[in-house]
Amino acid sequence: MFLRWPPVPLLLSLIVSPAWSVHNRGDEFEQPVSQPHIVFVLVDDQGFRDVGYHGSEIKTPNIDWLAAQGVKLENYYVQPLCSPSRSQLMTGRYQIHTGLQHSIIRATQPNCLPLENVTLPQKLKEAGYSTHMVGKWHLGFYKRGCLPTQRGFDTFFGSLLGSGDYYSHYKCEGPGMCGYDLYEGEEAAWEQDRGLYSTVMFTRKAVSILANHNPHRQPLFLYLAYQAVHSPLQVPAHYLERYKGIPNPHRRKYAAMVSCLDEAIHNLTQALKRFGYYDNTVIVYSTDNGGQPLAGGSNWPLRGSKATYWEGGIRGVGFVHSPLLVKKGSKCRSLVHITDWFPTLVTLGGGTLDEDLNLDGYDVWEAISEGRSSPRLDILHNIDPIYVKAKNGSWKAGYGLWNTAIQAALRVGHWKLLTGVPGYSDWVPPQTFSNQRLTTRHHNERVRWDRGKSVWLFNITADPYERVDLSQRYPHIVKKMLMRLVQYNKTAVPVRYPTKDLRSNPQYNGGVWGPWYKDEKQQREEEEEEGYNNLFMSHLGKRRWKNKSKNKKLKRKAEH
């Protein structure tokens, strides 16, 4: 498929509605609302190196410009996987406090972001914002109450699952478990689907939302969560032409996908300017986790990849761009975590933060905008009590304080502690992508897991690439950090990771991935309704039978 973006002025003129065009002309000299508009762009699986300003061969001029004119977050952390990062963004809480400590939320599980957790859009809505989501949800959908429009968003257009085909929007979770995954609100978006590449489609929808909202009358929160650049590696053909010099096919497609994303960011920025938002808008750009080298991503020179607790899995690409920033064109080296966006954006939007929210995030706006010290001094990357694959992990290795078989990661100041099996631990240099098959490339940075280790300690400030393990040299630091893990673990709630529910199969839902679960009350109500319907139909059938018999008798009398 060969898709070209239309010129931005033409694209915007096609999307803006006539009603808003007339309305906008009347309001062009109005003062903007006092609360800033907030646009949060979340990108999927973009590696630490996969942006121009980190030295990549991938060209991202629009992202680079926004970052250069804003504040680059160079000590910014996310989670190693999709659902964990999204849950912490939406709630401002660590995974141990939502029960989502293990893996991701899978399409076939009766699981979602717990309903008792207040979300970021709910708090912004309370503060008077119009709230909209476009793109990937991946926080569960097994029942209606889990859907984005039930969790604080006025509108939703996008996908519920973690990945899928960029054009057809279909996803298979196994043999015979395939379905359609594109939604408008709470219904499948069959009528809105034109087979567009999702990066283009989501950007057009976002621009349409901007075009049809009055920025002078109500603040807007737009959460734009791109599917890109997650696998499968798909992209309009003309973007590949720019990267003919990259021999590795995965890297070449991945680079093209990033370039398409960069154009999308340009079109979004132009729309913010054209429709009167830009001067009073805060744009946040963030990855959800590190890149996956086997799918073309690069985290060099960091160690590890997506799905690991090495820096390559959790050090995020992030920046804030806004005319409202005090120190534009700077770098923020203070510690910032994805949970911090909840209190930061709610406070920025004039909302309230109640104590019973029990947030793990901090308001870091002054650290970002003015260059002040961050209130954050530590990060609990996670404690996963289900993932206990370290064969040599033990209470003894944890000085009797902690079972080091458990996968856990903690950052305190300069120090980072890892226990259990943190995940794939190689450093993957750019030269690796020169080979046609990345999976067969054995470079000299490979680390084997049969060395019997289950505890690591690094000074991340001095050694950001995690090359020098200091756990044997500083056992007292290890003990202090293990005690911190113990304290955190006391506050953890039980893990929510239910088994597969066969009722989730799209074939039972019209070929669409969507809510399938009914609690006892819903089931009882539906059974009662079905009972009434059956009773009514039975009664109606009897009346029809009596009328039919009566007519036959009258007919026989008439014949005689």
Image (spheres, rainbow, N blue to C red):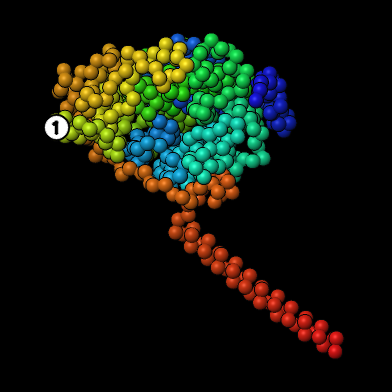
Residue at (65, 37) in percent of width and height = 192
| Percent of width and height locating residue 277 | 59, 24
On screen, residue 58 versus residue 357, left or right, reads right
Quarter of the image where the C terminus is located: bottom right
Quarter of the image where the N terminus is located: top right
Disc 1 marks which amino acid?
Lys
Front-most of residues 115 and 30? 115
Residue at (33, 43) in percent of width and height = 495
Residue at (64, 36) in percent of width and height = 193
On screen, residue 224 versus residue 545, left or right, reads left
Q: Report the residue marked by disc 1.
A: 396
| Percent of width and height locating residue 214 | 63, 30
Image quadrant assignment for residue 273: top right
The count of marks equals 1
Give SS at disc 1.
loop
- Residue 346 versus residue 267 in the image, above or below: below
Q: In this rendering, does residue 412 appear at all?
A: no
